[in-house]
Amino acid sequence: DTAVSQTPKYLVTQMGNDKSIKCEQNLGHDTMYWYKQDSKKFLKIMFSYNNKELIINETVPNRFSPKSPDKAHLNLHINSLELGDSAVYFCASSQNFQETQYFGPGTRLLVL
Amino acid sequence: GENVEQHPSTLSVQEGDSAVIKCTYSDSASNYFPWYKQELGKGPQLIIDIRSNVGEKKDQRIAVTLNKTAKHFSLHITETQPEDSAVYFCATPNSGYALNFGKGTSLLVTP
């Protein structure tokens, strides 16, 4: 009965590879997000999706692309991985952006 | 996006003491101010939030105060316990339908 789930929990890969992280929420929320948390614990919004429409796209390289097959899923695709992409990536969802955001457990990405 | 400054970055208190974390924001139109707690190895979790129509909100040992004139809001934890040890984040909405988070405060409660 997990509210927001992410897979995989850990991801170790080589530079230049392409990888995907999956996210699913069973809360019936309209808005989903991807955040990046760096080694200093700073949480930065990457993408926000509302009813399958991209709302914002911060200064994120176009190697990162969110894909939402339906309202309950928001997957993150990363092409040509770089060392600086190593971080913890969190998916979250909320009914709207001024309501409680529920975070997934995070995906720890390490690029070698 | 709007800036939100959070202080201190680290805070160590003895069990039973109070802890206060403060955030300042720049957008006077902000009207929603949540606080999140992140335990080691987990995602952040909302612990309390306040909207601009009130100045204070309390939930057991946790309280949040808001000063809209000065554009700052604070988290107060009383009678701290070791399980309060975590990283705490304040946040404000940005114009793009998401939250801008502060840089976090690492709170350590020592027995």
Image (spheres, coloured by chain):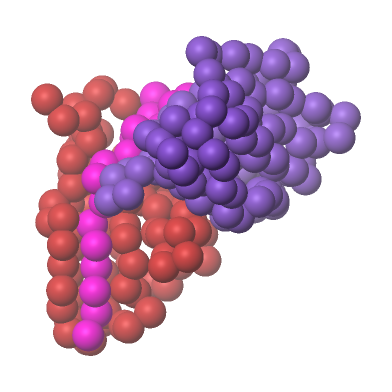
Residue drawn at point x = 59 percent, y = 14 percent: B58
In magenta, the rendered stretch is: A91-112
Left/right of residue B18 with respect to residue B56 in the rendered view: left
Quadrant housing residue B83: top left
Q: Depth check: give the residue in front, B99 or A61.
A: B99
Extreme-right residue of the structure: B69
Q: Position of residue A104 (x, y in %)?
A: 26, 42
Percent position (x, y) of residue B80? 51, 29
Q: Position of residue A1 (x, y in %)?
A: 12, 25
Q: Residue at x 54, y 39 (%)?
A: B14
Q: Could you say where residue A66 lies in the image, as x and y percent from the top left?
A: 30, 56
Which image quadrant: the C terminus of chain A? bottom left
Q: Is residue A22 magenta?
A: no
Rendered residue at 70%/24% (across/down): B65
Image position of A7 (left or right of B5):
left
Q: How many marks?
A: 0
The answer to which of A61 and A13 lies nearer the viewer is: A13
Drawing shade for chain A: red
Q: Is residue A38 left or right of residue A7?
A: right
Closer to the camera in the image, B109 or A14: B109
Would residue A49 be seen by someone viewing this image from the given angle? Answer: no
- In reply to whether residue A97 is colored magenta, the answer given is yes
| Residue at left offset 26%, top offset 23% | A28
Chain B rendering hue? purple
Residue A112 visible at all: yes
